[in-house]
Amino acid sequence: MAAPTKAMLLDWYRQMVLIREFEETCHRLYEEKRITGVYLHLYSGHEASGVGSMAALRKSDHVITAYRDHGIALILGMDPKAVMAEMMGKKTGSSGGKGGSMHLASKDHNFWGGYAIVGGHLPLAAGIALEARYHGKDDVTMTYVGDGATNNGYFHESLNMSAIWDLPVVWIIENNGYAMGTEVDRASGQVELHRKAEAYGIKSFGRVDAQNALEVYAVASKAVDYARANGPAVIEHVTYRYRGHGVSDKQYDAREDMSAELKEWMATREPIVILRDCIESQYNDVADTLAGHEADAKRIVAEAVTFAEASELPSGYEDLMRNTYVSSERVHKTAHTIGAGID
Amino acid sequence: MAARNVAMREAIRRALREEMHRDENVFVMGEEVAYWQGTHRVTRGFLEEFGERRVRDTPISEMAIGGVAVGAAMAGLRPVAEFMTINFAFLALDAIANHAAKVRYFFDGMFTVPLVYRAASGWGNQATASHSHAPEPIFAHFPGLYVGCPSNSLDAYGMLKASIRDDNPVLFTESIALYPKPSPMPDDLDEDYLIPIGKGDIKREGGDVTLVAYARGVDWALQAARALARDGVEAEVVDLRWLRPLDMALVYESFKKTNRCVIVEESLPMYSFGSEIAALLQENMFDYMDAPIKRVAAEDAPLPYSKDIELLALPDAQKVVNAVKEIL
């Protein structure tokens, strides 16, 4: 693996400040009831985990994640306008307003989606990787999985399947310390989550400080190369969530230990600051570029909000039923209306 | 047209084998589908013919079987994933109901999920409670999924082919009791013989009462119809074949003629196939209704091991005859 170039580092900074601006804006819009619903899981604090690891991928590789998916979508280059419109359930949203915050995806970016059932996307990842193996391609499927999901059956079955079939999956466990409100050591007999790989004969690349994008990138590059040539790999990213599990999370208000812990992470392990320090320690001509990225992030997100708020909502029976099935005239002819929903 | 009797398992095997030859992206996966030659012998010889790449034994991991098929289908393959019995598919209900059925919808059409789940269904001989379900209606509950349940060999052939070629996810159930049952298939059957998804079939014509059924229920309905004919009662047997989409147009047409209906199914009576058909008939055909709609289903109990009470719990042709006589 080559050390990241100056251009790469600056681009990572651009991605990270864009994510942070996007997520904090979502948080504010939710409080103002301009984004509604009950689910909104923000990537603030996690930025280096996604940015550093996805930098190790090439364009033909695949990415899939759970419901904390906004950051992943933005890193892959999805249009922030379409992502914000999806937050607001608009027709112009990336999923036409049908999916919401937890169901972003983009076929054009090989982004197979955010999924809302904990662990539900893990066998899908194995299936996507199986297609690559089946057709003799060496594309990797990078799969993000939370610490909580490592305790459910999908994790066990999917990792085991990836091992026996030598599937090119990089399983990245994003360990942010909590499954909703349950600490890792109250939920998992094995608290070094990457060691679960051993149970399946999968190579573990260990535990990484995922507040540091450079460390994330270094390990992810090795794991991606390994997966491409051999089969599944596991990495554990140790990170932290700044906005709790999701918008329903009131723990940080109720528990002093947790709010102190959050402050400590933000003060000492802030991923954007860590990256910025690293860039500034190597290059002395970057101030304008960094400031430019910060200003761009604000502008891009503001434009996304304007676009989303001006967009139409889906409405009527046709929008409700569309894409329940692939259109199929022969079915439509005979279907009882309850079974129809065919465009 | 010359025809010969073929067991349903042979018809299913033939359909699957031909589809694998037709399309290189079609592959099978499941427990014991390869080296064991298939628990129900449907995939007998497949490993030798197609190799391990396309005939994939899985661990006992139903959640993964359900979900891997979804991912592989989204990525462009056409998986035919087998649940050894439908009882084990309960373990995969999230993959089936939340993912296979909904991925297309919640990404507003970005992905297609052209997969088939095959599952052996129904009660066996003293298979006991946890292995004795015919729970097709549970799966038919979910929009986004199709559910096909053939009642004879030719239907199984044409329905499975249609399911594999369709771009939507299909749960295809195969009655264990029907696997060995021979029924006629034409000698010169076209490899493109497809039974459209959602198209039911009149298996016997009659003007006095409509018997609505699917899969094994069709057998009981036909036996009952023959018995009733001896008493001068002509029953029409409607085989819906697909639980979703439901070919209610065919049922209504028959009901307009007979004005009476008995619904026959192998599964449990509450929140059932029978409940659904009866509800739709009373909503849409009230003016044609001359008698209460009757339902014949399994008794509302888990299936026991001991033979006499096991048989007591299950529907049969006599129960159908009795139900018809109550409303004539």
Image: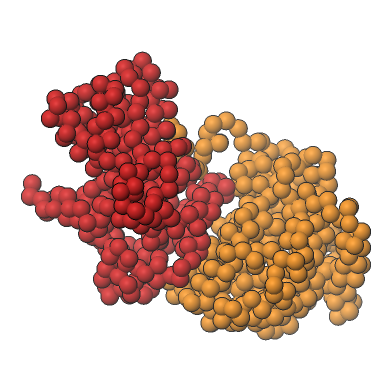
Chain colours: A orange, B red
Q: Is residue A98 left or right of residue B240?
A: right
* Residue farthest top in this picture: B287
Q: Is residue A84 left or right of residue B114?
A: right
Q: Is residue A311 left or right of residue B209?
A: right
Which residue is pictured at 54% across the width and 68% down the height?
A: A158
Residue A37 in sight from this viewpoint: yes
Q: Where is residue B44, by image quadrant?
A: bottom left
Task: Give above or below for B36 relative to A118.
Answer: below
* Residue farthest left in this picture: B2
Give the image location of residue B123, x and y in percent. Answer: 34, 52
Which residue is pictured at 21% across the width and 35% down the height?
A: B224
Give the image location of residue A146, x and y in percent. Answer: 69, 64
Instruction: Look at the image and tell me in which quarter the C terminus of chain B lies.
Output: top left
Which residue is pictured at 48% across the width and 54% down the height?
A: B90
Give the image location of residue B31, x and y in percent. Answer: 40, 67
Give the image location of residue A23, x and y in percent. Answer: 78, 54
Q: Please name whichever residue, B57 or B234, is drawn nearer the observer in this view of the structure.
A: B234
Task: Give above or below for A244 relative to A201.
Answer: above
Residue A329 in sight from this viewpoint: no
Which residue is pictured at 61% across the width and 36% down the height?
A: A314
Q: How many marks?
A: 0
Q: Please name whichever residue, B105 or B260, is drawn nearer the observer in this view of the structure.
A: B260
